[in-house]
Amino acid sequence: MGNRPSEELKKQGNDYIHITGFVDDVDEYLERAWLAVFPLDQGAGIKMKVLRSLATGTPVITTMVGAEGIDEDGEVISLAETDGEFAEGIIMHFRDAEMMEEKAGKSREYIRDHFSWEISERVLEEVYGKD
C-alpha cells in the first residue's frame, strides 16, 4: 500500500528517492520535489495529490487513472502506463532541466486556468443555479 510501504520497499530509498508512506502534510514534500511520480492503477475521481503537485509547480508523471478528470490528454502531465514508460519518463525529465522548468510553469498555469476557485464557483453555479 502507498500509505504503508513494506520494509523491503523502504530499503530501496536513497538520497534522491524518499519512500515515506503516510505523511501529515504532503505539500511539504511536493514543494521540495523535482518530480512527482504516481503509478496509480486504481481509484476513481480526481486525485488531489496530482492537483496539488501541479499547483506547486512539480512536474507529474502518472497513469491515465492518475490523470482522470485533470489532464487526460497529457497537456502538462506526462502519461505512462508500464514500468518501462515510467523509467523512460523519469530519466527524460532529469536529463532535461529546461523541460522541467517549462513544465513547472505550465503546471501552475494549467491549474490556475482549469481548477481555480473562480472556475469551480462558475461550475457550481451552472450545476446548482445562483440564489
Image (cartoon, helix red, strand yellow):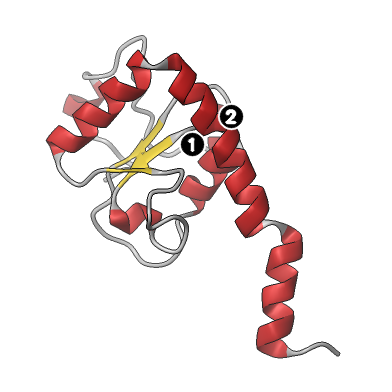
Task: Kindly indicate the quadrant of the structure image that contains residue 18.
Answer: top left
Between discs 2 and 1, the one toward the N terminus:
1
Q: At 36% across and 17% down in the image, what residue appears?
A: 94
Q: Which amino acid lies under the numbered mark 2 shown in the image of this protein?
A: Glu
**Label 1 secondary element:** loop
Q: Classify 85 as above or below 64.
A: above
Q: Regarding mark 2 in the picture, which secondary structure is present there? A: helix
- The residue under the point 52% across, 39% down is 53
Q: How many marks?
A: 2
Mark 1 neighbour density, 10 Å: few (under 14) some (14–19) many (20 or more): few
Looking at the image, residue 82 lies above or below residue 128: above
- Place of residue 24 in the rendered image (x, y in percent of width and height, measured from the top left): 55, 39
Quarter-of-image position of residue 78: top left
- Which mark is drawn over residue 28? 2
x and y, in percent, of residue 92 in the image: 29, 23
Q: Residue at x 46, y 43 (%)?
A: 76
Image quadrant where residue 8 sits: top left
Label 1 belongs to which residue? 23
Relative to 102, 109 lies left or right = right
Q: CA distance from mark 2 to mark 1?
A: 9 Å
Can the viewer see residue 33? Answer: no
Crowdedness of circle 2 by 10 Å Cα count: few (<14), some, many (20+)?
few
The extreme top residue here reads 15
Residue 41, above or below 54: below
Q: Could you say where residue 39 lies in the image, as x and y percent from the top left?
A: 27, 43
Residue 39 - label: none
Q: Eyeballing the image, is 15 above or below 11?
A: above
Numbered disc in front, either 2 or 1 = 2
Picture coordinates of residue 89 (x, y %)? 27, 30
In contact (CB < 8 Å): disc 2 and disc 1: yes
Residue at (29, 26) in percent of width and height: 90
Amino acid type for the residue under numbered disc 1: Val
